[in-house]
Image: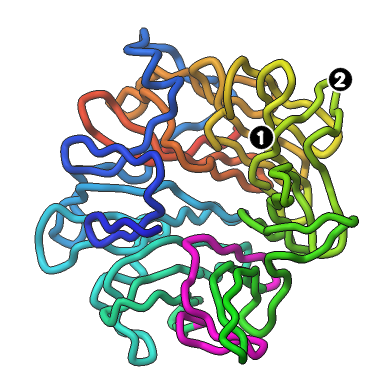
Amino acid sequence: MYKILFGLTLPARGMKLRNGSIFLLTTSILAAGLYAANAPNPGYKIKIVATTGQEVGGNQLAGLTRPAINDAGDVLYIGAFQSGSISAGLFVSGRQIIKIGDTIGGHQIASFFGYAINNVGEVVFGATESSGSHSLFGKIGAFEWRIVGEGDVVDGLKLWTLDPQFALNDLGEIVFSGEFSDQNGTPGHGIFTPRRLIVKGGVVINHQVIDPGNLALSNLEVFFRGTTASGSTGILTPNREVVKAGDTIGGLQLTDVGAPVVSPRGNLLFEAQTTTGSGLFTERSVVTTAVGGMLGANEAINDRGEVAFVASNALYLNKTVVLSFGTKIGGHTVDGVGDFPIALNNGGIIAFLSGSFDGTKFIVVASPNH
């Protein structure tokens, strides 16, 4: 399902609006209230790279979305404007690279629904066209192109619906999911590259019939969350079962496995419910645990195995507190982290969407001092 705000098309899940801007809050933040101001970790340089109220090209930013970051430190995000001729644009480190109303190969952009950037500097974004159709587009430097979209035929299958999730790796490979019909008109759902079907609903992996869901892509293979006919969950690739409900990691038995997060070289991170609560896991170890449901999808992992996550009203990198909520940065109080994944690159730099309880939203970048 898609939801359009300020010319941005976003998956309609857990969304909260305040003061006309876009911000999603985790349950822990809502429950925490106001915090006392804290000093930032002296081992990090912490700065705000974009904020609502900021003027860009004569237009004032009214909304921001979660950032993505690559190893060069390029920060990718969408900014929505309060007024003016431009309703929203896609930015890399403060520079607008595409905007609502632009046309690529005859396809006019009406809104955005997702984006990714790799270590080569290639940007891929999803957009609703003025026709109402959804497509994926690519951009690197001045070169722009349409990659794939609804109505296209891929591997003999006609795409009817493009899901609002996709992934890009450093090789320029792209995977996405969507609904299709075959040459006989039989409908289905699957994970694709722009040229072929990778896996579809009803695939048999390790003697289990699997319905594929949330996906992630490393430079080596595609990972996805799968559900069996009995409702059991796990993380799989098209050829193997990586982890599943019933497995035990670090003495904790998994009962429900969440969506995969992977680094470029394939380090895996995921949330899971357990027999005693919930936790954040790598393929072989426990990162952190909590009482209750899933932690909120605020986590990332890099090729060095470093894990960034939110717990106990603070942002962590492994066991180090990078930033406690309530810290003042550039005159703004960081009161939480948006309910979208944190971005983490291989240099240990973290980027995330945050905000103050006065309604200001901003993107924070925390860089280690080394």
Which of 268/118 is in front?
Answer: 268
Secondary structure beneath dot 1 equals strand
> What residue did someone put label 1 on?
271
Q: Would residue 311 appear left or right of 28 to someone viewing this image? A: right
Quadrant in the rendering for residue 91: bottom left
> x and y percent of residue 113 in the render?
39, 62
Farthest residue, direction top: 36
| Residue at x 10% of width, y 57% of height | 83
What amino acid does circle 1 point to?
Answer: Glu
| Residue at x 78% of width, y 26% of height | 286
> Most prominent secondary structure in the magenta stretch?
strand
Q: Is residue 360 above or below residue 333?
A: below
Asked whether residue 168 is drawn in magenta, I would say yes
Write down the region rendered in magenta.
147-171
Q: Can you say which quadrant of the picture contains the N terminus?
A: bottom left
Quadrant in the rendering for residue 155: bottom right
Q: Label 2, label 1: how many angstroms apart (C-alpha)?
A: 15 Å
What amino acid does circle 2 point to?
Answer: Gly
Local packing at callout 2 (Cα closer than 10 Å; few below 14, some 14-19, many 20+) is few
> x and y percent of residue 261 in the render?
66, 47
| Residue at x 50% of width, y 23% of height | 323
Farthest residue, direction left: 84
Q: Would residue 54 appear left or right of 269 to someone viewing this image? A: left
> What residue did someone put label 2 on?
251
Q: Are marks 2 and 1 in contact (CB under 8 Å)?
A: no
> x and y percent of residue 216 in the render?
66, 56
Asked whether residue 105 is drawn in magenta, I would say no
Local packing at callout 1 (Cα closer than 10 Å; few below 14, some 14-19, many 20+) is many
Quadrant in the rendering for residue 301: top right
